[in-house]
Structure formats: structure tokens, C-alpha cells
Image (cartoon, rainbow, N blue to C red):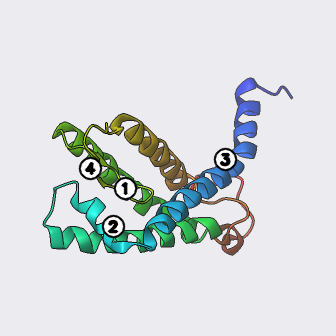
Amino acid sequence: MTVTASHTGAARWAAVRPWLGVAARLGLAAVWLIAGGAKVGDLAASGRAVNAYQVMPYDVATVIGAALPFVELALGALLLFGLATRLAAGISAALLVVFVAGIASAWSRGLAIDCGCFGSGGQLAAGQAPSYLPEILRDLGFLALAGFLLIWPRTPVSVDGWLAGPPVEDDDE
């Protein structure tokens, strides 16, 4: 029996993929836990950061800003434990698309704001330049992690994996 290169490549991918999933899941969990943890202590500042984007009324922005850290912490906890991974990845992807669109919108409208992604946020001081491109690229990287987990949510060392039992050889989750 001859082993083809594509067969060994597929076998290698099947062996590596679950551990890449663990890295994606824990990396995205860390992002949400750090982001939510940085904002949860000052919900008013989180509301002001959302309001700085100038895309919704002040009252709506403050409510969204106050709720956002709790959503981020919940996503981080779900991903940390690997519980409802596909759902958490889907919500993460949706939030990240909204964040990228918000940052791009602020950039295109000439606003000078800090995204507020990891605390603080809001209007920048006069003469301080925003860093929109790195923020967008960072969030696109996080979106790639969420996308990986949407396609392959089942990972080792997770509640989802434990509840599902041993992996099936043709598992195309």
C-alpha cells in the first residue's frame, strides 16, 4: 500500500486541527475576558466610548455600552470552558463585524476616537492621532479565530468535546 502525499497531509491536518481549535478558542476567550474585564468597572465610560462613534442616540449608546462588557465576559467564559463553542463563535463573529464596521465608519467620517475595545475609549485629545488600521486588522484576526471555531467548534479539553464523546473519524463539524 502506497501512502500518497495528500493522504499524509490530510492525516497531519486531522491531528493538528483540534489543537489549533484549542488555541483559537482560548485566544478568543482571552480577548473577550480582557476586553470585558477592562470595561466592567466603569460602565459609564463604556457607554461614552460607544457614543463616541456617533451612530445612535446617546441613551441607546449608553445602554449598549453598559451591556457590552457583560456580553464579552459571557463569551469569554463560554469559550474558555468550550461550552456552546459554535454559538459563542457565531456571536463573536457578529460582534467583530460590527466592531470593524464601526471603526471603519469612524475613520471614514474623520472622527478622532479611541475604539474603546479594551477600556477607556471616546474622543481623543487634540493632536492625538487615531490608529484605525491596526485596530481593524487586529479585529479581522480575531474574526479569523471565530471563523475557525464556526467551522470546527469541537476541540479537546472542552465541555463540548466531553459531552459529545470521542471524535468520529469523518467529523466535518
Residue positioned 74% across, 24% down in the render: 5
The label on residue 28 is none
Q: Is residue 1 left or right of residue 28?
A: right
Q: Is residue 94 left or right of residue 138?
A: left
Amino acid of disc 2: Ala
Q: Position of residue 44 (x, y in %)?
A: 31, 72
Residue positioned 31% across, 39% down in the render: 128
Counting residues from the start of the chain, the first of labels 1 and 4 encountered is: 4
Give the mark toward the camera: 1 or 2: 2
| Disc 2 to disc 4: CB gap under 8 Å | no
Task: Name the residue at the right extreme.
Answer: 1
Q: Indicate the secondary structure of the residue bearing disc 1.
A: loop
The residue lying toward the viewer, choosing from 166 and 108, is 108
Give the mark toward the camera: 1 or 3: 1
Counting residues from the start of the chain, the first of labels 3 and 2 encountered is: 3
Q: Indicate the secondary structure of the residue bearing disc 2.
A: helix
Dot 2 corresponds to which residue?
45
Dot 1 corresponds to which residue?
116
- The vertical placement of 27 against 41, above or below, is above
Q: Position of residue 164 (x, y in %)?
A: 67, 71
Give the mark toward the camera: 3 or 4: 4
Q: Is residue 12 left or right of residue 143?
A: right
Give the mark toward the camera: 1 or 4: 1
Dot 3 corresponds to which residue?
20
Kindly report the distance in space between the C-alpha atoms of the residues bearing marks 1 and 3. 29 Å
Dot 4 corresponds to which residue?
102
Kindly report the distance in space between the C-alpha atoms of the residues bearing marks 3 and 2. 35 Å
Q: Indicate the secondary structure of the residue bearing disc 3.
A: helix
| Disc 1 to disc 2: CB gap under 8 Å | yes
